[in-house]
Image (tube, rainbow, N blue to C red):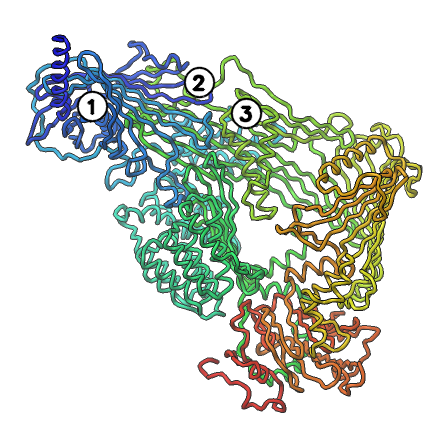
Amino acid sequence: MLLCYCFLLFGLATNQVWTDTVNRSPFREGIEYRYEWEASIESESGVNNQVVTSTWLRGQLYVISKVEDSKWRSLLKIKNISLAIQHGDKGDSTTAPPGNTFIELTELNEQLSKPFHLLYSGSKVGAAAFLDDKEPLWSTNFKRSISSILQVDLSGINNRIYTDHELSLYGKCGVNYYSSPLPDNQYRVTKYRDLDSCPEKLGRWRTFIDMPSCSGGEHQTIAGLTSTTRYVVAPNRGYPELLKIESSSVVWLDPFGAGKSSMKSKTNLTMHLEKTRRSSESLSPSKLLFKDQLKFVFQRENDKRVDLKAAQNLMLHPESLIYGQENLRRRTQLDLINAVEFLSAESYTSEQRISLDVLPLSSVSYQLGSLDYINAKALYKELAIAPKNEKLHTARNLFLDLILHSGSNVGVILIRDLILEGQLDVWTAARLVAYAGVYVKEPSEKLLLEFLQILDAKISGEGDQLSVFKNAAILAVASLIGKTCSDSPSSCRSVKIEEWQQKYYKIVAASSSSFAERALYVHALQNIGYGSVLDLILEMATKRAALDDESANDLRVYIIKGLNPYKKQAKVLNIILRVLRDVKDSFRVRIAAAQVILDEFVNAEMLEQMRQLLSDEKNSQVRNYVISAIKTIANSHNPCNSLLREQAKQLVNSLVGENMSESSSSAEYAYDFLDSASLFGSQLNLRTISSEFDDLPGYVAGKVLYFVKGVTVQPFSFTVRMSGMRKYITNLSSSTLQKEDLVMSRISATMDDFNFAPRRELGVSSLDVVFKLHGTIVMFYNFDKNFLASALASATNLEFLHDLSFNIQRYATTGALLYTQPNGLGLPVSFVFSAPILISLKGSISKTKQSGTVGRHLNFNLYGEIYGDHGILTHFTPLNLTQGVIRNRKAIFNVPLNLEVSVDPKKMQTDVTIVNPKATNAIEISSFARTILTLRPSETSYEKVRRACPQCLPVVVILKKGSTLKTETIANLSSTLLGTEAHAQVFNCDGERSVGKQIQTVIEALNPVTMNYRGNAAGWAYLSFLRLQHHMFIQPEGRHCGYRGRIFRSNYLPVKELFCRFKMKSNMSDDAEVSWQSGKMSAKIELNWKGETVASDRKGELDLTYEYRSAGSRNNVNVRAFVVRSPLLNITKDFMICLKADSVFQPTPADIIDISGYNQPPVAQGSIEYVMGDVSSSSQCPTDQFRFKMGIKASAGHWVMQRRNEANIWPYKECDIEKKSQNWAPGIVPQTEACYHTALDFTTLSNYNFEFRFAAVPFQLEKMMGKMGDLISLSLLPYWKTEPNSNTDQVGQSKEVGRIQVNVTFLPDKMDDGGQMVNLHWATNNVIERYEYVNLPFGNFLLPSTSIPRTTRIAYEGDVFPSCLVTSQYIRTLDKVKFNNSFSPCYTLITSDCGSNPLFGVFVRRTAGLYPLATKVQVGGHTIEIMPDESGRRKQFTVRANDVEMDVTNDSFTLPEGRDKFYVLKVRYQAPIYVISSPGAGLLIHYSGSHVAVFPTWFHKNQHCGLCGNFDGETDREWISPQGCPVNNATVLVASYTLGQTCYPNQEKIACPETTS
């Protein structure tokens, strides 16, 4: 009992000791603590666990504390630091190197020995101070890490588990504590930092490329981080002394979501208390500036430079710093020459070119970036010494690209000097100057002032070439000004950014400047930044221009698009919203405002603004664009919009029932790829904005985005603007129609009765191209009417495509990211991602010399290299030493093309010869990957690293011990017939990635079901490419795998060339009526796979003949394929395949379909005969070989007769009502939508009977057909209705083995989900099977019609051709607005190409006979008038052509005009319709006496007047008078467009106010 009581007292005493201790500093006053510490930094790969590289540090830490002003202040000194480096097995790396390998370095001791001070609040650090303001950041950051470790919250030590917030390298973050008692009254305390609770991001992005910041990615990081510290604490005289500290942190990289691909940078620090002693040392100075934070510092205040290594330097090979300048120049010259050798495909094998040991061009670029100006200029001269030497010329091209991409200032100045000295041609100069402002990494005012001389460069070239160069120079200077002075104007003393902004603005605002010049300087101003002229720019953006002033509105579009970076400002957003809501403004300007709002930096408030806009927006183009852009946000995987996705979906769902205009092209599309497991993806955005007519947009904009762990990167974007292109295309499509060929007097005299409002002028045709690279506009050029005219002339003359040679190399860095965050020791750890690409094109185009032919010989070789590197690197700043893990990946592709094309226009013959590539220059795509551990010293630290680690190599390649590279062959295909081989292999280094897994990966990548590809082939192809790139090239699993695919000429009986001759014959008549009734065409293809000798040639022929009669109701097709014998290829006899097919449709297809005369459903029938086998003659088909014949009989469903007779459902009921109305004369089928669908439903074939007959069927084919039949029967078992062998007359029973009968009936009833139901019966081998009401999973069957061709149906239902329908009682306008109307006996204008000089006019008046309407059409100087008999007794029409009566019952009549045989106006009768056409004017008219239908072309959009409307795509401005003002009454509208004053006096015709006109 006494013992228990003693233990209880001891526990209470101990508890009291800790209670008094936990709130005190861990260091006693006046006592010097000496800690021995050891730290390590290790880099390792998660794939291979056998190799690691590490840096070790040792030293001592002294701590002295004193109470000042009631605050506990500690002085800390680090002394006697030494360093060791090692690499090897991970098992060895956990143990420190032997003591004799550690070396002392002055660089470490000089800085780390400088004392620093901490203020303690209890046992936690509350603030820190550093004595030397010039102490390097690496040193102070290391001390911040020590300070962060030297604090531990002991307030909850008795609770075992507790939490707190404390200062750290990552800000004031949450900490989770766990405590447990140890013997001798000690405690073990473990703390885990909750880094998700830190208030800010842990790291920083540093890159030269455009990375829009957005709310969706703000709180995500590229790399993971864990931090743990363990303490052993013991009370000593009332203070919690830290006896031992073990701290570890891991920065791990997993950008692709695969655990095995993680790469790590680990830090460990062990500190133990070695000795304590009393100290009287004073803590000087007495006054210090303490800051209450320990956060890692990236850069000092007011310092633009980041005190860390740039991305390109982190990846630099050590040789470029170790060698001196002259040696580096020589080495780089050799590297460039070697790189050129690799571009010659036949110089190296495939294995050599895919090898990762070959120095990549990115490394050559980094080396060039280390050259000084003298050596860079000398290297250029050495490469340019022989311009005609192809190898040196190619090396010079690579040099120019690579030195610019290095980002060095030397490269920019060198390019400037070469241009000023006239050593570069104008195109090369323009391209290089454009890039100069993009890649420069360290802009300075000195560099800017030197580069400004490029604006005054005198360079030789022609007009367009000089303009392109001038534009590039202006944009490059602007981007350099922006990079140098916008972030820190104080760094620019001579260059005042405000002056440049004012200068550019004055040019933009000057009305005397051309549109091209003003638009150029708008983009230059965007490169600088609107800055001081932002208010003036906003004023220009809101200043509305006339709707027909295309140039002014297009300029506003460019100005508004430049407001994107400023839209977070309230005043800017309000201006953009005001423009968007202005319904009187140009819809293209309004769409530009919507694009700015919905492009980047979108927030919930902006989406709510769009909701309010859509509630009352009437303009279809604006509405369609906004809806499509919101759909993009709702459906895309862009992390910038991830927080808004649900809100956007709600908004889209509220618009589900809305019918969007089919003709509008204002839209946004996004093609997404994002691996849900990896958060690595891509997006292609395309935007189209409508122009004057809808089939050709006024703007097409696009951009490419990359997503990496919630961060969005935008490498490039483009915009193409088209203005006045209607005029250009109209001239192109009707170039034979000349103005002087037309006699305008007749139509002008008629149109004088109207006072037309001025028609919107077409303006000057022009085309703008804008290209933005990594956030910088590098290209703007305006192609004016002269350029377009010359381009049109060149397109019609192929002479310019000959005697050309190509030797082009282009290098580009499509992605280069650097994300840096501190590790546990305060040293920067960076994630690096780069993707440089090289494209090389060599070859020529020459003219073939054959009389009577047009021929070209094309010989090209396209070669490319793509690198994809990512890794994690730690920069040991004291030594400028980088160590880390890098995944190198390389892909190459090679496409040789040796092709000759010869065309003989007279013979209608085309010859094509393709050379089959040799194995030494095969068609190839290959990829390979590896992981390396890099240890990169600098020039100053190279010898020190050698001392610290004599066995360390600069770059260590990880190779798994005991493993060799394995090659698994997916397929090796060799075709003797084609003389070609195809090889495909997979390389397997250290992963168990089987062939089956590879094939599965490819199938998954191509699966469209899992894609968001907007339902088109282009989107599917783009996303499939990205997926294959991700899985096969990027290889997220991190395995060192690769693949290779090659196609080349076989060694055995090779095919050297592939020859094809294509002959075409046609007897199609130029007369449309004749060609409508009948025609015949044939084609013959001769093939020869040429071998090394004639005996090894593979020859064959293919003949095809197609003939139709009775307007396509009877069709006949004959196909003959003939293969010539070739004993060497084991083809002992000539071989032939013959196929014959015919079809008959009843009745004959026609424009007007009258279903009232049918006594039974429409029918069609056809047959196909197929035979193949050996023959003795090339002109006679075989008769005793495998034969196949199929007969088809199809009919409309029996239910269509009942529907027609009862006419009680739509569309039969509505069409029947229209037939009986006064609109349509008896016997005339109404040309309405209801009657169209009635005719389509009645004539659609839905019941099909097939009969198949076989003879001499090969056993294998018969067996396969039996299995297929069993499989189909099994899959249809749920629908089986009739037992086998039962009798039925539905299909008929077959007793012949080689005969199969099948009946398929598509039922009129649909499933609830829209699926199609069919009845399926078949009979074979005396067995009949019947399956009824089979549900097909899809229902959009485009079944054929006996009378309506499929092309006509697609054109009608897709609204391909605009039309206006006029009857005696109503009009349906070109914009699909229907209104009631009645005509007078005077002619009324229904439509015209209005203006002061109209091209055509169509008029209608009321008549008194059986047919209610007469029409008159005027085109050029001609008039055709068709009038029905007005006596009421006869169904006759009178046709007058230029006041002369003509009979067109049996033949058409043409009114010729102008030169040659060009006709202006033609009329023909195709019962019961008169067809009036003028192709040159783009006009087609149908007239029946009951209706007039006008079909203009899209080229006339937005320039019409008359009762058919103005054809502008809008429905709210249909009734416009000739004077241009709106009309609210149909009677007044008709009066305004009626000729003369007989029917309507002038008082009844509306007159617009003068201000309106």
Q: Dot 1: few (<14), some (14–19), or many (≥20) neighbours within 10 Å?
A: many
Q: Earlier in the sequence, mark 2 or mark 3?
A: 2
| Mark 1: amino acid | Ile
Give x and y (percent) for residue 66: 8, 25
When the figure is inspected, residue 744 is found, relative to residue 605, above or below; the finding is below
| Mark 2: amino acid | Asn
Label 1 with label 3: CB-CB less than 8 Å: no
Q: Earlier in the sequence, mark 1 or mark 3?
A: 1
How far separated are the C-alphas under marks 1 and 3? 51 Å
How far separated are the C-alphas under marks 2 and 3? 17 Å
For residue 989, side relative to residue 1497 (left or right): left
Q: Which residue is mark 3?
A: 1041
Q: Nearer the viewer, residue 736 or 411?
A: 736
Q: Nearer the viewer, residue 1240 or 316?
A: 1240
Q: Dot 2: few (<14), some (14–19), or many (≥20) neighbours within 10 Å?
A: few
For residue 1138, side relative to residue 609 (left or right): right
Q: Which residue is mark 2?
A: 49
Disc 3 secondary structure class? loop
